Image (tube, rainbow, N blue to C red):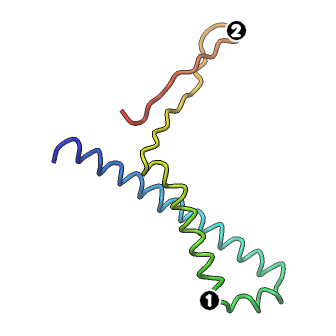
Amino acid sequence: MDDNDDDELDGLWIALDILLCTASILSLCAISIDRYLAITRPLAYSRRRRSKRLALSMISCVWVAAAIITSPPILGCKVTCSRILPTPGFGQHPHVPIDFHD
């Protein structure tokens, strides 16, 4: 394997990491919303809870949102972050660019 293959595998690994972590977080949010509705509106919730269509739509929304959040790195959008490093002197805070893709 050459360096180009390694870069592709790294990109795939990062994209899958973002996708699966985002889906996990959004799933926890969906479960929290579901539990909140079960507690605050028990009568209305018990009628809607039996709907498999609602469950499938919530799961689909979680995965679609995770895919949308993951798509910029997959499509090649590179982000350069910057952080502020304090330097000696009054009011001097230069921005130092940090490129995570090198």
According to the picture, the residue beneath numbered tag 2 turns out to be 90
Residue 92 x %, y %: 65, 12
Tally the marks: 2
Amino acid type, mark 2? Phe
Task: Where is residue 76? Give x, y as percent.
Answer: 42, 45
- Residue at horizontal 36 percent and vertical 32 percent from the top: 102
Q: CB atoms at circles 2 and 1 under 8 Å apart?
A: no
Q: Any mark on residue 52, and which? A: 1
Instruction: Determine crowd level at label 2: few under 14, some 14-19, many 20+ residues with C-alpha closer than 10 A.
Output: few
Q: Is residue 46 above or below residue 27?
A: below
Residue 25 as seen in the image, left or right of residue 49: left
Q: Is residue 14 left or right of residue 80?
A: left
The residue positioned 47% from the left and 55% from the top of the image is: 18
Q: Position of residue 96 (x, y in %)?
A: 52, 21
State the residue in front, 26 or 52: 52
Q: Quadrant of residue 12?
A: bottom left
